[in-house]
Image (cartoon, rainbow, N blue to C red):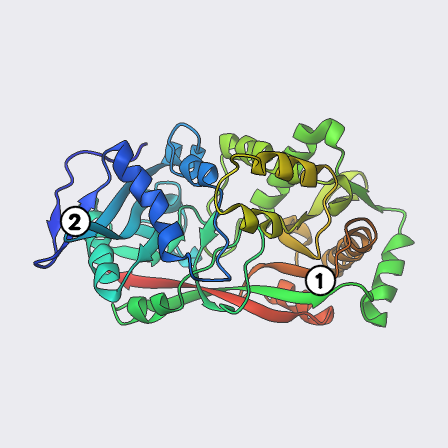
Amino acid sequence: MQIITQKVQIITVSSHIVIKPVTTKAQLKSFVELAYRLNANDPHWVPPLKSETYALLSPQKNPFFEHATVQLFLAEDDGKIVGRISAHIDHLALEQPVEQGLGPGTGNWGLLEAENEAAAKALIEAAEKWLKEQGMHRIIAPMSLSVWDEPGLLTTGHDHSPTVMMGHHNAEYQGWIETDGYKSVKELITYDLPITEGFPPLIERIVKSGERSNKLRLRKVDKRHFDRDAKIIMNILNDAWSDNWGFVPLTDHEIDHVGVKLKPIVYEDLIMIAELEGKPVAFMMSLPDLNDQIKKMKGSLLPFNWAKLLWWLKSPTSPTMRVPLMGVVKDLQNSRMASQMAFMMIEYIRREAVANYGATRGEIGWILDDNKGMVAIADAIESKINRVYTLYEKAI
């Protein structure tokens, strides 16, 4: 699969707004650069490293393109770039059961940035038209690009910056999208909690009970065997999340790609694997909030930001830790053992984060709004919702 660059016509939406497909390197640069201009005055927006954005959009570097078809669009108003959007079809998502949220006939758009409502709606219209021409009859959006990247539109939590690998969007987009016929289909929630003082007495008792078990063992990730442990984690993830809304399995190439991408920000004491009678059955991953450093770099590693980042990565300190991923194999889900392992991993990582990285708060998520098990765990450790990302649905 690839980025489509041919047979897509220029669309004139009005006398002054024109939608053009991205077909040249210059247009791709405009697509990437636009976000930095439109969000420059938002104090809570974290400019992503441009190299990361280009890699996301590169069929040569992003294995998502091995099972996806993507078309990028730009909006021009009297020759000025005023918006962008991606329209895309994940062919693995088309194979998923309809009751899990995606399935046959479901396409996506994402990476929306627009200077005004007219540009936003023109871009969405162009994405809808392209997806319909590809045989799609339904849209779930925004999805930027994969469900494993940055799904959803930020609809709660615009008053603070996102943590590492999370999105931040103009608050006006919500109204523009919803008045265009899109209805909320799923909410992705993140939870915030203080971590310096530990958890309630009930959680402490559950953790101590687990520590007395001869069958249960928790271990740190071993970077000397990083490839082995990365595959263990991703295989658990594919199994644990396989019944979740919106699930699309990670391919072997994507698993390898994720491992390479995460290795520089993986710290052994912040990732736990739980083993039951010697078999890996659960994991929890926590990351220092790299966004604290990235925000200062304004999208570029040059001239010396690369050295600053490498220095920080050698011995990071961060007030915030994010838990982006946690999973328990399906055979143990909804069991007391699953909850016990989750609380144990959270507590073990909490101790390390406070002692070794100067962390004072944690963020868990995103979590599906109907994931009762994870919501119950978040409630039990007295965390509070701090951000909500909404995914929308529309028939076309």
Give the residue drawn at x 24%, y 33%: 24
Query: Which residue position holds label 1?
Result: 361
Percent position of residue 25, x then y: 28, 32
Which residue appears farthest toward the left when viewing the image? 15
Give the residue drawn at x 7%, y 58%: 15
Q: Which mark is residue 212?
A: none
Instruction: Compute the Cα span from label 2 to label 1.
Output: 46 Å
Whether 75 is drawn above or below 174: the answer is above
Which structural element holds mark 1? strand
Q: What residue type is labelled 1?
A: Arg
Percent position of residue 181, x then y: 26, 69
The answer to whether residue 208 is left or right of residue 318 is right
Whether 33 is drawn above or below 182: the answer is above
Whether 219 is drawn above or below 12: the answer is above
Q: Residue 79 carries which label?
A: 2
Q: How crowded is mark 1: few (under 14 residues within 10 Å), some or many (20 or more)?
A: some
Whether 298 is drawn above or below 334: the answer is above
